[in-house]
């Protein structure tokens, strides 16, 4: 048996609780190296309990994960659709990084794929094959500690432009449309640990091109339209109560006629707002990622305009307007942002 199995102390000479607090304060970027120290450290750092301990004690780290267009190589003419990758923005240090490509898709993410995060992991799901544009059912999970992708059990059926949200190690999807462009009312939940899908009760109506948002213990499916009303977005939303397993319809939840995808904001009182209507600088292609004390908002002033990146402070009192403050972004990370989410690592 390996000598590690006989080790009873996390850090020799220190009480267990103090050693745990020392490891808790390690920055997430060091976890991959630290997990190689011994088997006990590896098991601890990769455990769900350690993640929630770090979260409870305030030592997790919030960053924005963005599905972002890769820069075009000017020495050759661009061919076809832009390629996308996942960029990671650390709002505290202002640093930018890019997640390694999914091994199955080394040349770019599936078009219009959905992303969400839970328990410090990033989930990429669905979309269209970047080569054939066929809808896919692939599910991938990225672990920031090991910096590795894992392919999981496929989605139970092909669907595009669906709502997606994640909480407590589970990923919820609802709505969208099937391969025949029929809007869907069905919903499913994926458990990351068990790698299993479970069907949920259907929503009260079809919702294509809807947006998913987790608010408290509820999964909201915002706006969308049915098969016969393509492009005419509903003002209503439906929320799935995680505690009861039931859907509840909310009238007049979405006060905009615009598509809600990527641009749904949540006010302090729970009201839903549209980032595309918050400022003329992000009128086109708006995307907002709530990072806690502030929100990263991206978008353009008009079609074809350069993509801008802004911060909005979330500390304003209800009723007060927060201004967008422009931030400088490296050229390699200045491309169009299709969608995004906040990962707490």
Image (tube, helix red, strand yellow):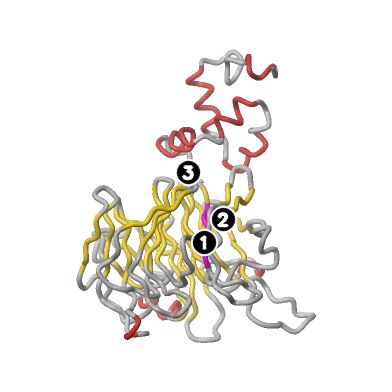
- Number of other residues with Cα within 10 Å of mark 2, as a class: few under 14, some 14 to 19, many 20 or more: some
Q: Dots 3 and 2: beta carbons under 8 Å?
A: no
Whole-angstrom CA distance, mark 1 to mark 3, is 17 Å
Q: Mark 3 or mark 2, which has the lower sequence index? A: 2
Name the element at disc 3.
loop
Q: Is 273 left, or right, of 9 in this rendering?
A: left
**Magenta region:** 122-126
Which residue position is annotated with label 1?
Answer: 125
* Relative depth, front residue between 225 and 342: 225
Which residue position is annotated with label 2?
Answer: 140
- 149 vs 111: above or below: above
Location of residue 266 (image quadrant): bottom left
- Which of pointers 1 and 3 indicates the residue nearer the eye? 3
State the quadrant of the N terminus.
top right
Which residue position is annotated with label 3?
Answer: 194
Q: Is 83 left, or right, of 18 in this rendering?
A: right
* Relative depth, front residue between 274 and 185: 185
Q: Mark 1 or mark 3, which has the lower sequence index? A: 1
Please give the name of the residue rendered at 40% of the width and 78% of the height, measured from the top-left corner: 182
Does the magenta run of residues contain 199? no
* Relative depth, front residue between 340 and 125: 125
Q: Main secondary structure of the magenta part?
A: strand
Q: Is 249 left, or right, of 196 in this rendering?
A: left
Q: Position of residue 286 (x, y in %)?
A: 45, 74
Please give the name of the residue rendered at 64% of the width and 76% of the height, measured from the top-left corner: 132
């Amino acid at each position: 048996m390996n000598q590690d199995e006989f080790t009873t102390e996390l850090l020799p000479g220190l009480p267990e609780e103090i050693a745990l607090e020392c490891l808790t304060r390690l920055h997430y970027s060091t976890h991959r190296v630290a997990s190689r120290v011994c088997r006990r450290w590896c098991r601890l750092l990769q455990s769900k309990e350690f993640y929630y301990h770090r979260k409870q004690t305030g030592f997790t780290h919030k960053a924005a994960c963005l599905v972002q267009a890769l820069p075009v190589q000017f020495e050759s003419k661009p061919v076809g659709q832009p390629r996308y990758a996942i960029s990671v923005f650390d709002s505290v240090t202002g640093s930018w990084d890019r997640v390694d490509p999914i091994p199955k898709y080394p040349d770019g993410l599936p078009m219009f794929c959905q992303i969400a995060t839970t328990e410090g992991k990033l989930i990429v799901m669905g979309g269209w094959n970047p080569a054939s544009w066929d809808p896919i059912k692939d599910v991938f999970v990225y672990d920031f500690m090991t910096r590795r992708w894992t392919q999981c059990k496929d989605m139970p059926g092909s669907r595009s432009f669906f709502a997606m949200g994640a909480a407590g190690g589970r990923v919820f999807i609802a709505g969208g449309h099937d391969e025949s462009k029929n809007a869907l009312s069905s919903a499913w939940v994926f458990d990351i640990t068990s790698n299993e899908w479970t069907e949920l009760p259907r929503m009260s109506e079809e919702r294509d091109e809807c947006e998913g948002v987790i608010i408290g213990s509820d999964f909201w499916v915002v706006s969308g339209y049915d098969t016969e009303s393509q492009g005419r977005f509903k003002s209503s939303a439906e929320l799935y109560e995680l505690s009861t397993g039931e859907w509840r319809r909310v009238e007049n939840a979405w006060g905009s006629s615009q598509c809600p995808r990527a641009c749904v904001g949540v006010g302090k009182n729970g009201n839903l707002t549209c980032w595309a209507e918050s400022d003329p600088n992000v009128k086109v292609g708006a995307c907002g990622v709530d990072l806690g004390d502030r929100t990263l908002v991206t978008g353009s002033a008009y079609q074809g305009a350069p993509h801008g990146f802004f911060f909005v402070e979330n500390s304003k009192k209800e009723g007060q307007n927060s201004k967008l403050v422009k931030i400088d972004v490296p050229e390699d990370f200045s491309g169009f942002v299709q969608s995004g989410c906040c990962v707490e690592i």
